[in-house]
Amino acid sequence: MSFEPKIVGILCNWCSYTGADLAGTARIQYAPNVRVVRVMCSGRVDPSFVLKALQCGADGVLIAGCHLGDCHYQSGNYKTMRRFALMKRVLAQLGVEPDRVRLEWVSASEGERWAAVVNDMTEKVRALGPFTSGDGNNALGA
Amino acid sequence: MGKLKLALYWAGACGGCDVSVLDTNERILKIAELADLLLWPIALDFKYHHIEALPDEHIDVCLFNGAIRNSENEHLAKLLRQKSKVMVAYGSCAHLGGIPGLANFSTRRDILHHVYMDSASTVNPGGTVPLEKTALPIGDLELPKFHYEVHSLDQVVPVDYYLPGCPPAVDQVWAAIEAIATDKLPAAGSVVGADQVALCDKCTRKKSEKRIKEFKSIAQVIPDPEICFLEQGIVCCGPATRAGCGAPCINANMPCRGCYGPAPDVPDMGGKLLSAIASVIDSDDPAEIDRIVAQIEDPAGTFYRFSLPSSLLSGTQQKEAA
Amino acid sequence: MKRITIDPITRLEGHGKIEIFLDDTGEVADVYFQVPELRGFEKFCQGRPVWELASIVPKICGVCPGAHHLAAGKAIDAVYKVDPPPAAKKLRELFYSAHYVHSHIAHFYALAAPDFVVGPTADPAQRNILGVVAKVGLELGGAVIAHRKMAQEIQATLAGHQTHTRWCVPGGVSRGITEAQRLEVVEKAISCLEFAKTSIKIFDDVVLKNKEYVDLILSDAYSLTTHYMGLVDDNNRVNFYDGKVRVVDTAGKEIVKYAPAEYLNHVGEHVETWSYLKFPFLKAKGWKGLVDGQDSGVYRAAPLARLNAADGMATPLAQQEYDKFFQTLGGKPVHATLAQHWARIVELAYASERLLELANDPEVASPNVRCLPQATPHEGVGIVEAPRGTLTHHYVTDERGMTTNVNLIVGTTNNHAPICMSIKKAAKGLIKRGKEITEGTLNMIEMAFRAYDPCFSCATHSLPGRLPFEVVVREPDGSIAHVAKR
Ligand code: SF4
Ligand code: SF4
Ligand code: SF4
Ligand code: FES
């Protein structure tokens, strides 16, 4: 059976969500693998959201926010950028491949770009295969 | 109610937790007054079959320290759970996986290979590795199975209370034992013997606005003993750690490493710490941010120093196929 | 084939288990001492910043964390090629002397004294620290607890915590002490030295004046002819914190004296399938199996070994006891396993004298307790004498100080092979065909093991507890033929 990656997209309300919406209304064809969660600002994305998504079975997580300088709360995406830089190092140590978690800036008018990012990420995660998280309760000595 | 029936047990542990009970010194005699110690391997006669013979829930309270590292630890955890009314995860190892949980950064195969073949002083041309069963002409010798990963106690059996610390602070131990003995325990599932705030909230170091252009290692600096470590660019786990230890490390001029576990409402210490640490970085420039972030030593091993097995991702993605 | 299982016995960086196999005639055929636990520190210390190991490796053992902390501290100094200022070195040794006082008091009064003061085959209900107190006087019990506590407090005053300290940093320690604190330590050290003298006297009165005990110590069942290892100073005197490792052979002749960095030329570790703990041996002799003698690679470490491997003690009272020790026991080296207890008393005297000596040195209150490293980190070995044997930590790092390789040879591990052999020898000497295995027999087998102080001793002293001990003799079909326990 072929593997269809499950990707959780966490999108800021003002730019990226609108951009994704545009991709839909413009009927751009792109991979259907991203389940979208809308947040008010990419700055709201707590690292534990990403960890939780992976733990709950996501094969990848895509965070998207306004381009630098365009955040509706001034500095939300700068915060995200700083966190993401550190999160990349932590995830690498935890054995999560770099291509599984991605941060992108997508504006309200970049429907095409959104579609391209999703397609590219879907292919990369597909190549990596399913993500298996530490399975806590039932992996004893198995 | 008669005298409290108490059991203490260690699993994948260092013994420091047991010593913390002994360090209650004179008060240990008071413990003996309050409770009958049914089981305490370091101090009292005990055999596995004695525990097996007890009726279920015969033990009122079991203080269980140590991580679940091997099949024997797991077996005893299950047995003691069955025999005890209240199960307390005592110390960081039982609570979170603790220091032995750092093993979850590696696979079982790599650990065995390093210890028994690659390590510098090992002379092992035949590639011998300890086995669960060794058949000798004279009879079989058995060893417990070394699990693929380390688990915290509550990943193996239900736990009623958590008493954090590596080891728990002696005063907190005493307070918790008294609470247990006098039936003054809070709601099941709570952390006992610790505070309801983060260590930073109790820390007396001077704090102002934190803006960091450079992270430093203790190897490179003598920290100012008065000022918040984070403000000096030294990673400190205080923002995500539950208060209650009395801050012995901070007082010894060493940054916190989080042995008291996650502060209230922190689902994952690593996640919380990476936000907290990233938020002090003083730069808007992606290249400079990367450069500053690269100065942080071993972020996952520091943020999850005591909590890797109980973290959201458990650190076991590198686990070999079973 | 009958089989006797003693499980669990006590703790030794984990749990322990003894299997005794009897042959069809009821004689002891073989004995295995198994360590069923592994945690894998050598692996998971890799990838950590090397300076952090000083607070990670003590979690190997909460009974002697101080030894691991200091061995790590010294290895890390070596990795960074930095020499701590004199005050820092003295503080570390001061801390360590307190650690020894605590550990040796604990072992002697909880584990050794009951056998000698009360008697090896006395009623088990009496054969514990309460029995000791009943025999030598009530104030003693209080004094034992008080001095163990004092020694713990000195460690906490210096290093911030009595158990899992975070204090050693590359090039020194994280904080010094004040003059007021120093004077506090002096007070306690004076008291500890007095207590050491009391302990010498108790040993003298109760053991040495009793010919039966001296004969027991010297009896063949408790003797093992091995080589000996211990850290010595420039004058070949016992040192716990610093110096070179000296190894003497079964006749007391020096085989080698090596600096920490050379340890790999001299010590190897053998692996068996039936224990998670490895078996160190001398490379000069090679691993010849679990045998003693001049050609075997098996050596011993810990108090008896340290006295055998050195030429004397660096302090007057300890030297006096050292001389008496060898005079009484028939010259060097002493192969009697049970003499470990007396050796521990000699060391208690040394630790207490050294504690006071260092506390009296005004320099320990100096604020200059750290030199910052300048060199690029690379590789280092740190060796101290843990109460239970020579402790070796070896770290390699990349140029940023991230650990790439770790090797540890832990105190009790040195004695892994000797412990197996001592138990076997005692069992062979004491379990005889047709003779009932009594509680007293069991205790006397256990004494062979207990002399090595395999770790949990320090902890047991506070309670009137004894090592759990039970021997089950099984028929070949697994049914129980005989159970003896206490
Ligand atoms: S929590 Fe700390 S003190 Fe307790 S057993 Fe684990 S490592 Fe030792
Ligand atoms: S980060 Fe550390 S030093 Fe700073 S306030 Fe928090 S606990 Fe104190
Ligand atoms: S300061 Fe941090 S690491 Fe130190 S004892 Fe407290 S919680 Fe544990
Ligand atoms: S509102 Fe879009 S990133 Fe802040």
Image: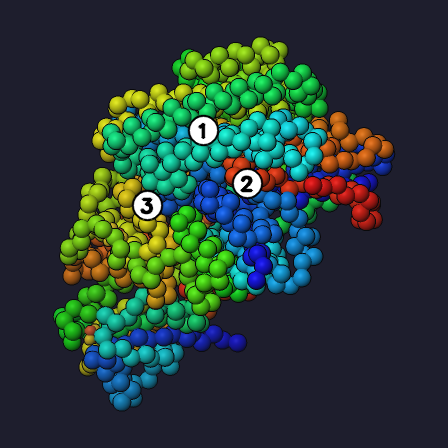
Q: Residue at x 40, y 42 (%)?
A: C164
Q: Which residue matches tag 1?
A: C101
Judging from the image, mark 1 belongs to the subunit labelled C
Mark 2 vs mark 1: tell me if same chain. yes
Q: Which residue matches tag 2?
A: C463
Image coordinates of residue B58 in percent, x first then y, are 62, 61
Task: Tell me the mark number nearer the camera, choosing from 3 and 2.
Answer: 2
Residue C132 — which label? none
| Residues at discs 3 and 2 in contact (Cβ within 8 Å) | no
Spatial CA distance of label 3 from label 2 is 27 Å
Residue placed most toward the observer, A12 or A127: A12
Spatial CA distance of label 1 from label 3 is 23 Å
Q: Residue at x 51, y 36 (%)?
A: C458
Spatial CA distance of label 2 from label 1 is 18 Å
CB at mark 2 closer than 8 A to ligand 1? Answer: no
Tag 1's secondary structure? helix
Q: Which of the two labelled residues, at mark 2 and mark 1, occupies the earlier sequence position?
A: 1
Which quadrant does the C terminus of chain B fall into? bottom right
Q: Residue at x 33, y 79 (%)?
A: A36
Mark 3 vs mark 2: tell me if same chain. no
Question: In terms of image quadrants, where is residue C418?
Answer: top right
Q: Is residue C325 left or right of residue B255?
A: right
| Residues at discs 2 and 1 in contact (Cβ within 8 Å) | no
Q: Which residue matches tag 3?
A: B248
Tag 2's secondary structure? loop
Give the answer, above or below, for where C375 lies relative to B100: above
